[in-house]
Image (tube, rainbow, N blue to C red):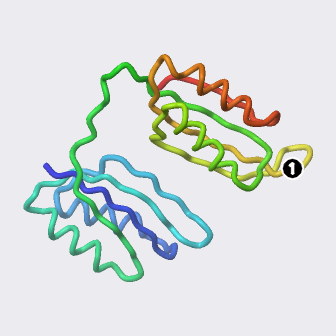
Amino acid sequence: MKHLVISFISPDRLGLVDTLSSLVKQHQGNWQTSSLHHLSGFFAGVIEVSITAEQSADLIDKLQSITDFKCHIETASANVKNTSDSADIILELTANDREGIVQEISSIINNKGGNLLKLVSSHESAPYSGQELFKAKATISIADDSLDVLIDALENLADDLMVDISRE
């Protein structure tokens, strides 16, 4: 089996996910993992599909022929879980929104030996003050002995940054 990683962007329209999932099914593919989002009038996402080598070329051709649908497709190995002495942890971050906050957080994760596996962020208003908040949920892989150093660095980034940690 091949694993196709399909990233795409398209003007948002009704039935787009139905079209994609129908094509995957028609080619006997299995929709594995995905992250799909509506962003400022566009629909964007990443999908992992497992599919036989015989069916993959035709599926790729069909995906690339969809009108107003820009995609990039890579062939990958099946996702293999890391069994080293690292842990996957989930960080839930909340702070007053400001320019550069994603760069600050990603830099600390990188500099403390973490590998950012997933980041989902949002921008919203605080309930009472109306202050703009940055919220993020990050999944990272990090060596067990580096976890405390990472958490200390994140918590010292700013007085308003709250960090909740859980293990995956």
Q: Position of residue 111 (x, y in %)?
A: 54, 36
Residue highlighted by disc 1: 131
Extreme residue toward the front, this view: 111
Q: What's the residue at 46%, 74% (across, down)?
A: 10
Identify whether 61 is placed above or below 164.
below
Q: At 72% across and 39% down in the image, what residue appears?
A: 94
Q: Residue furthest left?
A: 54
Q: Estimate how packed mark 1 is, as few (under 14), some (14 to 19) or many (20 or more) residues with alpha carbons within 10 Å.
A: few
Element marked by disc 1: loop
Q: Position of residue 110 (x, y in %)?
A: 52, 39
Q: Is residue 86 left or right of residue 53?
A: right
Single out the residue that lies furthest toward the right: 129
Q: Return the x and y of residue 125 as percentages of the image width and height.
A: 81, 51
Given the image, on which type of amino acid does mark 1 rest?
Gln
Judged left or right of residue 107, residue 127 is: right
* Left or right: residue 24 compared with residue 117: left
Residue drawn at x 66%, y 45% is: 104
Q: Is residue 81 above or below residue 135?
A: above
- Answer with the quarter of the image where residue 9 lies: bottom left
Between 10 and 103, the one lying in front of the other is 103
